[in-house]
Image: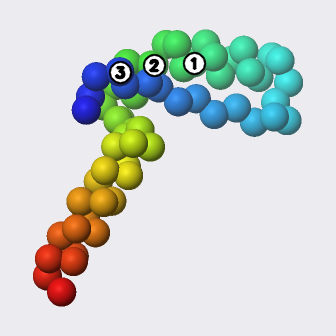
Amino acid sequence: MWQGMQSVMVFDPKDNQVETDRKWREWMQHKSSVGDKYVPTAAETRKYLNELENRKQGYA
């Protein structure tokens, strides 16, 4: 599950190039801090939700 982790960086479309460059520099300096924030893929989320639904049906 943890393999292939990707970091996500959000930009504001209203930012000018200087602000965008600043955000990139800041992210590059601190990108190790996002290593523990895993975001599941869509397929993993679907699988998880299906498993929850199957458990609910077993209790009904």
* x and y percentages locating residue 44 in the rendered image: 34, 43
Disc 3 versus disc 2: distance between alpha carbons? 19 Å
Image-quadrant location for residue 2: top left
Residue drawn at the location 61% of the way across and 13% of the way down: 25
Q: Relative to residue 4, is residue 18 drawn left or right?
A: right
**Sequence-first tag of 3 and 2:** 3
Tell me the amino acid under the disc marked 2.
His
Give the camera-side residue of 17 and 55. Answer: 55
Q: Position of residue 3 (x, y in %)?
A: 28, 22
Query: In this figure, which residue is indicated by the disc labeled 3?
Result: 4
Query: Counting other residues with Cα less than 10 Å from the Cα at mark 2, is it few (<14), some (14-19), or many (20 or more)?
Result: few
Camera-side mark, 1 or 3: 3
The residue where tag 1 is placed is 26
- At numbered mark 1, what does the secondary structure look like: helix, strand or loop? helix
Q: CA distance from mark 1 to mark 2?
A: 6 Å
Of 22 and 53, nearer the camera is 53
Residue placed at 82% from the left, 30% from the top? 15
Q: In the displayed structure, would residue 17 be above or below residue 1?
A: above
Mark 3 falls on what kind of element? loop
Name the residue type under label 3: Gly
Tell which tag, 3 or 2, sits nearer the viewer.
3
| In-image side of 24 versus 54 (left or right) | right
- The C terminus lies in which quarter of the figure? bottom left
